Amino acid sequence: MHNKPNISQISSLIGDPARAKMMIALLGGKALSASELALEANITSQTASSHLAKLVKGSLIAVQKQGRHRYFQLKGQEVAKLLELLLHLSSGVEHSHVKTGPRNPELRTARVCYDHLAGRIAVQLFESVSSNGYLAFRDGQVNLTAKGRTFFENLGADLEQMRTKRRPLCRSCLDWSERRHHLAGSLGQWILSDLFKKRWAKKDPDSRVIGFTKKGLDQFSELYFSGI
């Protein structure tokens, strides 16, 4: 009995409003200091430090020391996935006339979901590559097809290197605002890194918003949305 997983411990850690706000702030993938997270949660630095210590002990966030400073990040993909799912579920229990997801239209359009693209553009991307036969999506499972391997390798994706990682190559992630799926996993991470590398878009340093340039969005759309 004592060896069974204790989900109440995890839920109590995330369930505190201040801790929840700090963890959602970390969904952007950026390491933040205790003082920055205190501002996000609207609490004092001392209170934030106490909350962060509990989250570190509970293996929900990780801390990295750099000189005299300490920076905090979510402890991996599974924690980020859990937070996105909770955001989705929490918006679903509100009144039906309430619009799901973030109110900021820029966040709804494109944002970072830990290390991959989320929002309306990400959902369109997932549907496009699926329609073009690059991904096979069935019963919640996503697999890269032979046609998809050729497509992404021609774009420069090192799929063999990605397969050596512990995380899945492709994974579906239910989008908080769109209520449809977008692409996560190593390939989802590569797509986000690639569009940054091509300077088609950049991340807002103070939020999770990803802003496309006009030219960048045109090129991104031509590459991924053509043929549908």
Image: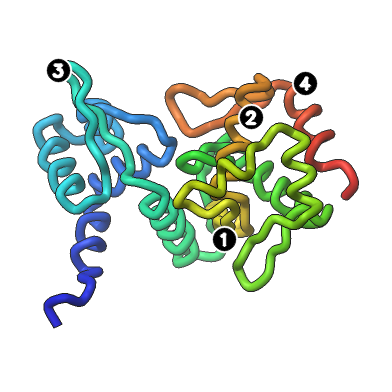
Residue 151 or residue 9, whichever sits in front: 151
Does label 4 or label 1 sit earlier along the sequence?
A: 1
- State the residue position of label 1: 97
Colour mapping: rainbow
Does label 2 or label 4 sit earlier along the sequence?
A: 2
Type of the residue with mark 1? His
Type of the residue with mark 2? Asp
- State the residue position of label 3: 68
Give the percent coordinates (x, y) of residue 110.
61, 37
Identify the secondary structure beneath mark 3: loop
Q: Is residue 71 above or below residue 56?
A: above
Give the percent coordinates (x, y) of residue 207.
45, 30
Closer to the observer: label 3 or label 4? 3
Type of the residue with mark 3? Arg
Q: CA distance from mark 2 to mark 3?
A: 33 Å
- State the residue position of label 2: 194
Q: CA distance from mark 3 to mark 1?
A: 48 Å
